[in-house]
Amino acid sequence: MFTLIKREIQDHILYLIGSTVLTAILIVALTTFAFQQDTRIDWDDLIAPVIPLAIITMLGFCAMGVSQMYTDRNRRISAFVSTLPVTRTQILFARIATGILTILILLIPLIITITILIRWFEPPIPMYAGIIFNISLTTFLMMFTCYCIGLLTGWNPSKVIPTFGALVLTCILMPLVMIKGFGWEIAMILAAFIAALLIRTWQTFTSTSL
């Protein structure tokens, strides 16, 4: 299994590098912004740049899922790997594990940075911990949902359907989160959506002729 994950990382290393570079840029930007404030951080000033950045980031993870599956289909990677003592389920699991790793590379350093900045600049209010957790959980699920959309649509042999289908489904998520807000309700909706996407992806991937 580790060998499969290592292969996925090598084949899609640009996405992992992209996540690393993006999180480094965001950490520097957040830290600079925080220290430019007088006493408290005015988080409302971050809303305008965060929304388009979030959309672009989610589309990026969707693109990663599409790239993994579309490259597999065209280069017949799974057909080759399947000649080894591994199953298609293991191949798909390694692919998903790589996607999750890429998301965590982006999110974990950011979460740590934001937590430190809040403790440095904001009063010690217990509710901040809950807010950070809810936002972090929802953000992870949103990104993972977009990634799963990419996996499902990327296995389609057409070039048009993965592109536009993933784009439309991904753009639906932002208004949904804005309506529901960050919390357990939206987390449960996203988790159910993720489960449906993964089940459908597994069924399609394991039943399609290689």
Image (cartoon, rainbow, N blue to C red):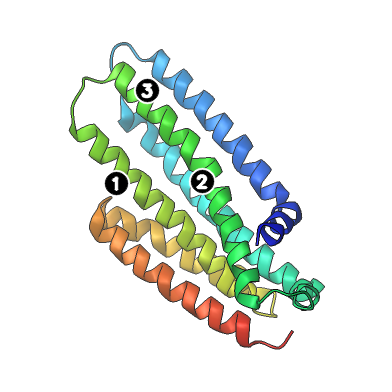
Q: Is residue 203 above or below residue 131?
A: below
| Left or right: 10 in relation to 145 | right
Of the residues under marks 1 and 3, which one precedes in the sequence? 3
Mark 1: secondary structure: helix
184 up-or-down from 111: above or below: below
Q: Residues within 10 Å of mark 1 (few under 14, many from 20)?
A: some
Marking on residue 134: 1
- The image shows residue 168 at horizontal and vertical percentages of 49, 68
Q: How many marks?
A: 3
Which residue is more in the foreground, 87 or 45? Answer: 87
SS label for mark 2: helix
Where residue 98 appears, as percent x and y from the top left, is: 61, 56
Q: Where does the N terminus fall, quadrant-wise?
A: bottom right
Q: Give the CA separation, mark 2 to mark 3.
A: 20 Å
Residue in the image at 51% along x and 53% along y: 58
Q: Are marks 2 and 3 in contact (CB under 8 Å)?
A: no
Asked if residue 149 shows in the view, the reply is: yes
Q: Which residue is mark 2?
A: 104
Q: Nearer the viewer, mark 2 or mark 1?
A: 2
Of the two numbered discs 2 and 3 in the rendering, the one whose residue sits closer to the viewer:
2
- In the rendered structure, are the residues bearing label 1 and label 3 in contact, judged by CB atoms less than 8 Å apart? no
SS type, badge 3: helix
Q: Nearer the viewer, residue 96 or 163?
A: 96
Q: Position of residue 181 (x, y in %)?
A: 26, 52
Residue wearing tag 3: 117
Residue 134 image offset from top left, x and y in percent: 29, 46
Q: Amino acid at mark 1?
A: Asn
Amino acid marked by disc 2: Leu
- The alpha-carbon separation of the residues under discs 1 and 3 comes to 17 Å
